[in-house]
Amino acid sequence: MNISHPPRIQVLDPRVAAGIAAGEVVERPASVVKELAENSLDAGATHVTVELRQGGLEFIRVVDDGRGIQANQLEVAFARHATSKLTTMDDLDSLSTLGFRGEALPSIAAAGHVRLVSRTAHANAAFIEIEGGRTLAAGAGSSALGTSVTVEALFSAIPARLKFMRTSGAEAGRARQVIDHLVLACPHVAFTLVTDGRVALRAPGSGSLRDAVAAVHGVEIADAMLEITPSPQARYPAHGLTCSPSTSRPNRTAIRTFVNGRWVQSRALTAAVEQAYVGLLMEGRYPVSVVLLEVPPDQVDINVHPNKREVRFVHEGEAFSSVQRAVRDALLANVPVAATPHQPSRVEGRDTAATSPSFTFSLPPIPSVSAAQPLIDTAAAPALALDELRAGAAPLAGATMPRLRVLGQIANTYVVAEGADGMYLVDQHAAHESVLFYRLLRHWARGEPEIQPLLDPVPVPLTPAQQDAVAEALPTLAAYGFILEDFGDGTWLLRAVPAMSRAVPAEKMIEELLAEGVVHPHGATPSHWAMAASIACHSAVRAGQSLSDEEMTELIHAMETTADPSHCPHGRPTTIRVTTSMLERAFGRA
């Protein structure tokens, strides 16, 4: 029997090891641009110019006006693990620089031909030239204050890597993304990007984030963006700029999140921005946002990814909520909202609207626990309980929605109303959904859910996956009025539901809430925004349901006290306006 010998363990040739390390740090030309530009920023540069030819594969040059490198340290700068940015393990807990591993320059030198020229404030310029990790020349040079690094024939020493490069235009686009991130993170630095002799980007370095956004996205978008300021309730301060719901993109690439001045790819922070737009953007549309989060260095680990693109938070849920609240506050402070012409007064801390009589079409008043009844008419469509919706309504300032007069209903789906400036078509399901959604959020904020106790608990069988989900979602479910109790053997007992949902089949609703994902995508605590949107959707009057004139009138009035009556929680519009001038033109009267 032949027994194969185990492979012999040996130390790699230094050039092979350098090539492997270069592949980890330098994936493509954009990686070189990122590392060199970050070095410029860490050196205190106020002006950085980046030049590319053929997407950076042929030529990359990064020039800055930073502090420079002393002549006797040029060769040391290209040694592995050489850095001026930390010395002990304790320094990792208080990092304030962008680069710190000491891998960038040697990795770049192992992947191409590099010439570095630098001058400090108190010495003459010096240069060093390296290729494939070997020093070719060094000596006195000529340079302004700062550093210039030129990289040519990238990956000539690692030809296998060239097979994975895209077109020069695509590689230049990736490098542009790197510069975009640095411009937004450092608006006080003037950046210039030149691609094949053409200026592709110029940022003024004025210190204004809005000017930086203008350089990246254009002046029109920058001027229209809303200011993000830290939420008083947040653990970490978050600030920046975000777009109004009228501006959106078909993907997430325009959501830029930064932690302590460093662009990061964070599913938690991206999800937080998206959650802030619940009810304001159509599904499949995403905002243009620049969010800068400040976290104490000892509460975030930036040493997770070789390229430092990802971070790990000690308190991820707090980072999520800090961003979500700040962005949502900015939106609600600027999105036009409607106000009721009849402002309910407050008596003994309660809105007088809460005492308004119920109409016959509405659900009866919520009974006390002792008089609780089981779910009623679970097969019927949700009733339009607008007396409940009026209770506790909080009219907001900045009204743009006029008082409307209901004219009728089209296809048992759309309410037709007249306003001073034309005709309004209201989607009854979307409008009712919006009213219920913001009512739920108001009661969430007060910690006072409207609960309908059940005389006979409803058994809800759950799969193992659903049991895991419901266990995590219990606090959020309870805060909205769902009281669940583990009965054993995969069954939970539902003892109470939100008052507005008492005509909805309970078992089906719990199942759908879990299936629709009431837990944040990054695995933190359940999202009460998503749950409120789902509860509102299930509880709202349906399309195709006939409404009386009184019901339609109360629905329109309820919209007047809603934070955002123009969209449902899933982003669909609730109202279409046809102005009088449009009608006059259509009928040839204009």
Image (tube, rainbow, N blue to C red):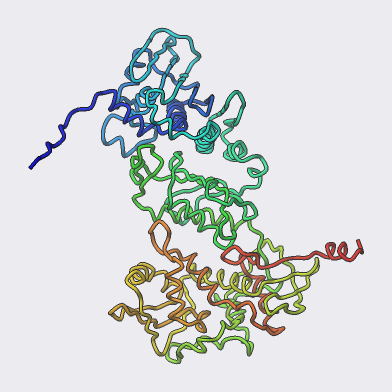
* Residue 283 in the image: above or below residue 507: above
The mark tally for this picture is 0
Pick the front one: 153 or 204: 153
Q: Is residue 285 left or right of residue 427?
A: left
Residue furthest to the left in view is: 1
Residue 426, image x, y percentages: 69, 71
Residue 129, image x, y percentages: 40, 14
Where, quadrant-wise, is the N terminus in this rendering? top left
Q: Quadrant of residue 361?
A: bottom right
Residue 365, image x, y percentages: 54, 87
Is residue 47 visible from the viewing direction of this image?
A: no
Residue 589, image x, y percentages: 92, 64
Residue furthest to the right in view is: 589
Where, quadrant-wise, is the C terminus in this rendering? bottom right
Q: Is residue 51 left or right of residue 73?
A: right
| Residue at 69% from the left image edge and 63% from the top image edge | 399
Q: Quadrant of residue 32?
A: top left
| Residue at 57% from the left image edge and 31% from the top image edge | 205
| Residue at 74% from the left image edge and 68% from the top image edge | 402
* Residue 566 in the image: above or below residue 289: below
Pick the front one: 29 or 295: 29
Is residue 260 visible from the viewing direction of this image?
A: yes
* Residue 43 in the image: above or below residue 424: above
Residue furthest to the top in view is: 140
| Residue at 62% from the left image edge and 26% from the top image edge | 198
